[in-house]
Image (cartoon, rainbow, N blue to C red):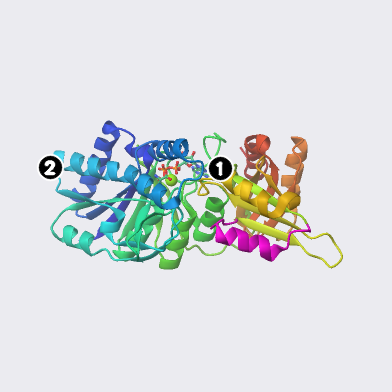
Amino acid sequence: MPIVVQKYGGSSVADAEKLGKVARRVKQKRDAGYQVVVVVSAMGDTTDDLLSLAKSVSQDPPRRELDMLLTCGERISMALLSMALQEQGVPAISFTGSQSGIITNDAHAQARIVEVRPYRIQDELAHGKVVIVAGYQGVSYKKEVTTLGRGGSDTTAVALAAALDAEACEIYSDVDGVFSADPRVVPDARKLESLSYDEMQELASAGAKVLNAQAVEWAKARGITILARTAHGQGTGTSVQELAVPTDSRVKGVTADAEMAVLVAHASVPLQELLEFLDARAVRGRTLAHDGLPGAPGRTFLAVPLADIHGPEALQRELATRFGAGVDWQDGWGTVTCVGVGLNADWVPLRKALSAAEALSARVHAVSTSPLQVTLLVDKAHLKTLTARLHRELLGS
Ligand code: ADP
Ligand code: ASP
Ligand code: MG
């Protein structure tokens, strides 16, 4: 029997009624002749609530303990979904990430999956059960419980689909797939029928939460097609897969990222020392630009995603102790990014982006381009209006 992996996000399992709906959807798939593995996220805002609870106890929570706490969220939803399925007469069993054989490195709060040993899942599927897996979590070789970073349940789903040689990997959320912009910000955004792995990875790392960037990286490496769909209706969704590279240049989507800080390091701070400092604290960067021309004052711009930092105030204090005024922590800036193909074939996309910013009197602090993206760094206050305007100008309304 073919295997399908379905992942349901937090909003799709937010309460008992929604869990019941998910159970009915899973039952339909099983009745259609599939072996079903279901990956669940924590219910509604549970992860955010647990994080606030941790912050009320400690400004810079020890990451090991944070992982012990945050993994409880997915445990709740996996157990409840298993109960809901059994209530509907479907044999089911729930597993934690560790029981599912999700082996990660030991980078607490932002671990990467290194191996999947899905033996218990395969055994239970062979016994005719639906297997529910707690997303977002794994276990290290030292048997420590880890989490995969915010949005990490998508990665669990893709990694399991690869390990189980599943026929499909379906990611269900509250939108019918990937749109040309966040439909909450740009109501005219259009649903995209298909996207290449590279385009999706750019969108995800530039702030489009609908799929997780690490999940897309896994899917690309293992050749897994992801189908992003709505949990609430019958939409056709978006498929993310390997696509032939188009010959013309085109913009596919516009996205913004507010969950970041920019470190601006002045000439007095040697780049090597700064990077060593960040690596020692597992602080990752989204983009880095360094101007080190001989004789010129070398400056470094580093965009740091904040979602998995969990103690930004403590990091800021440590930076100040180590580098004094040599490093500015700028958390008032965010990015707007156009994603597509061949975007540096000419300067038209960048020129349009700059004019849109000018029309809104949004000061552009920095610019970066590659064949796949054009990004402007602006004040966070302008992110939504600039995204909407750029969408209108580059993709029509
Ligand atoms: P889940 O909890 O199911 O994992 P997420 O909240 O992580 O769902 O992702 C879905 C959300 O992503 C949508 O509600 C939407 O607001 C947001 N989003 C951001 N950019 C896009 C985009 N380009 N297309 C679709 N949704 C987007
Ligand atoms: N519950 C986790 C989060 O909120 C993981 C996930 O939803 O994918 O980030
Ligand atoms: Mg998500």
Residue farthest to the front?
Answer: 321
Q: Is residue 31 left or right of residue 57?
A: left
Q: Nearer the viewer, residue 79 or 85?
A: 79
* Residue shown at 72% from the left, 46% from the top: 353
* SS at mark 2 in the image: loop
The tally of labels here is 2
Q: Nearer the viewer, residue 381 or 147?
A: 147
* Residue shown at 20% from the left, 51% from the top: 130
Q: Which residue is mark 1?
A: 181
- From the viewer's perspective, is the residue at label 1 or at label 2 nearer? 2
Tag 2: Cα neighbours inside 10 Å, few (<14), some, or many (≥20)? Answer: few
Q: Nearer the viewer, residue 200 or 277?
A: 277
* Residue shown at 43% from the left, 62% from the top: 218
**Rendering coords of residue 165 (x, y %):** 30, 65
Q: Amino acid at mark 2?
A: Gly
The Cα atoms of the two marked residues, 1 and 2, are separated by 40 Å
The range drawn in magenta is 267-285
Q: Which residue is mark 2?
A: 89
Q: Is residue 259 above or below residue 127?
A: above
* SS at mark 1 in the image: loop
Q: Is residue 252 visible?
A: no
Q: Quadrant of ligand 3?
A: top left
**Rendering coords of residue 96 (x, y %):** 28, 52
Classify mark 1 as within 8 Å of ligand 1 or not, answering yes or no: yes
Q: Amino acid at mark 1?
A: Ala
- Kindly indicate whether the residue at mark 2 contacts the one at mark 1 (C-beta within 8 angstroms): no
Dividing the picture into quarters, in which one does residue 389 lie?
Answer: top right
| 165 in the magenta segment | no
Q: Is residue 219 above or below residue 392?
A: below
